[in-house]
Image (cartoon, rainbow, N blue to C red):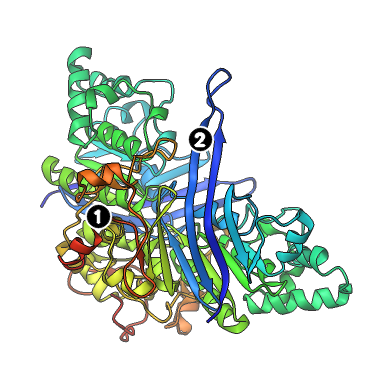
Amino acid sequence: MTNVLSVEDLEVTFALHESEVRAVNDLSFTLRQGETLAVVGESGSGKSQAFLAIMGLLAQNGRATGRALLGDVDLLNMPAGRLDAYRGRDIAMIFQDPMTSLNPSLRVRTQLSEVLVRHQGIEQEQATREAVAMLERVGIPEPAKRANAYPHELSGGMRQRVMIAMALLCKPKILIADEPTTALDVTVQAQMLDLFKNLTRDFGTALVMITHDLGVVAGLADRMMVMYGGRAVEKGTVDQLFYKPRHPYTLGLLHSTPHVAVRAKRLDPIQGLPPSLERLPTGCAFHPRCAFRFERCFAERPPLLDAGDGRLKACWYEGPLDYEEVA
Amino acid sequence: MPDLLTIDRLSKTFTISAGLFSQPLHLKALQDISFSVKQGETLGIVGESGCGKSTLGRCILQLLAPDEGRVLWLGEDIARLPDEAMRRKRQDLQIIFQDPLASLNPRLTVGEIIADPLRTLMPQLKSAERRQRVLRMMEAVGLLPEMINRYPHEFSGGQAQRIGIARALITEPKLIVCDEPVSALDVSVQAQILNLLADLKEQFGLTLIFISHNLSVVRHVSDRILVLYLGRMVELADGDELYEDPKHPYTRALLTAVPIPDPVRARQRNIDALVGEIPSPINPPSGCPFRTRCRYEIGLCAEQRPPLENAGGERLVACHRWRELGLEGGA
């Protein structure tokens, strides 16, 4: 399968008063046409900042280096003005809270049709028709009526559908979804995950699902990248990482996740807290919380290397991890 | 085991202004809620937004006054107690909130925050004694003694939640209402706090009411589970029974919607997503509140609200059709 996005050596730094903090380090990955890639990590792992950087949406004091190739176009090294030609057309992003991404003073139909007028130069009337058709496609009942609503008149689930509709209007090659279901009720979340599955299949869109919820990942993603302290620590297929994690952090996340079908006596959490990016531990950033650490982990940072079967891990420990049945 | 707490036909309605010249709206947050909590158990309360689960937690502690019904604590109705008497009762009943940082006073040190309930409830304690208690409690929840003079903003969410738990425990309460205590925390930290609550429950002989929208978490901690929908009880059952053989169509739908952290099972599973969204509690459907999203709806459901019926043992279910649906087997 062809790659729709190749990210190489992405670094994201933020200038603070007298110092600099690195949110993303040395991140490289590819996204294949039509696949769903889950990016999993806890707060401060850099999972959101990496993709905000690719979209050119970093905060004022943020800076990104490296390359993000969309075909032969490098999204990271182009003037902001030119980026607008690709954003929304080839690559789109949706967020956890749709209310912050929708303009509260414009009707839904105006916000949606604007995307088409701008990117495809089609006239207003047809743009509105296509917008309403897309609202119907994402499962909004009475789409013509809802198109006339303002965002505050819609429920949280409906707003998230409007966001998805807007993101998909130009049939982008890539859709980045940052915790899109976290704020939703569980029955609505299930509807949204279903919708993502159908839409990526029908439009051939590659989906990046940024989340901390392994339950969301399991049913939806093909491949998965686990991040910790601003770096990728393990990459592979979803089955590989769920059933045979090779990085102790991946294993720890799985053991920390309660399972609805099984009432375990105790969860087996990771000790300690996720690190502050301003004070990352030496060597492997995970070593203070790791049950498998040894001397080398304190001093040297493990590189992300081939661990067989096309998967990658950044860990010095080569012995067997204790694979208790997680599921 | 004796009942520690009995909620008897509790109702709570909020009045919402709809603008200067409009009739105010009435939001029925809770209607006709009755259940008991046994000494030493963990009762989980689950439901989606607007089901009334947090309002219920606050009504139990009298942080909100219920409009109707009784809250019997060891047989005594605390819903009508004068403020001062209720304050003393809070020695026995405590609460932990969702957003740990927002529930801690930013101007007080950790030691002062944890000691705060003692000042009001046990003013006779000398300050050295109070400090001893605080340190003991900090150790129990996994905070280091040197943290006693630090301020809340220096702590992460998980540590702040430990401070909140220590504050709740300091009066040696019998019952703690945990309102979404781990929802704001990272996954790895969430598991630590769940284990901590389990340990403390054992150590102090606590009874817990655990309110959450996360069914996996509730399943993990609860002995019995109460399911709410639009302010009404739809099912109450032993945890294993509820998850293995849900009787109410809403409980079934909730359970099938929970994401499973297991790729093969998740792919095989046919997510039979509920259609639509939760109706507004300002204008709930007639009859059964769930009928607008229920695939088993019949004419009767719109006409009559299903009574809460005994479904064997101590199980309760509010559905006109639970008997016939049960014959089809579990979800």
Q: Mark 2: which amino acid?
A: His
The mark total stands at: 2
Residue mark closest to the camera, 1 vs 2: 2
Residue B194, position in %: x, y?
Answer: 49, 72
Looking at this view, is B131 or A282 the one in front? B131
Q: Secondary structure at mark 2?
A: strand
Q: Could you tell me if residue B160 is visible in this image? A: no
The quarter in which the C terminus of chain B is drawn is bottom left
Q: Secondary structure at mark 1?
A: strand
Looking at this view, is A46 or B160 the one in front? B160
| Gap between marks 1 and 2 measured at Cα | 46 Å
Disc 2 is attached to a residue of which chain? B
Looking at this view, is B250 or A258 the one in front? B250
Tell me whether circle 1 and circle 2 mark residues in contact (CB < 8 Å).
Answer: no
Density class for disc 2 (Cα within 10 Å; few <14, some 14-19, many ≥20) is: some
**Which residue is label 1 attached to?**
A37
Looking at this view, is B73 or A45 the one in front? B73
Q: Could you tell me if residue A158 is visible in this image? A: yes
Identity of the residue drawn at 72% across and 57% down: B81
Residue B9, position in %: x, y?
Answer: 51, 56
Residue B95, position in %: x, y?
Answer: 62, 62
Query: Is B242 positioned to the left or the right of B41 in the image?
Result: left
Q: Within the image, what quadrant is residue B280 found in?
A: top left
Disc 1 is attached to a residue of which chain? A
Q: Is A243 drawn above or below residue B211 in the view shown?
A: below
Identity of the residue drawn at 72% across and 79% down: B136
Density class for disc 1 (Cα within 10 Å; few <14, some 14-19, many ≥20) is: many
Query: Is A56 positioned to the left or the right of B79 in the image?
Result: left
Q: Mark 1: which amino acid?
A: Leu
Identity of the residue drawn at 49% across and 38% down: B27
**Which residue is label 2 attached to?**
B26
Q: Is B105 drawn above or below residue B269 in the view shown?
A: above
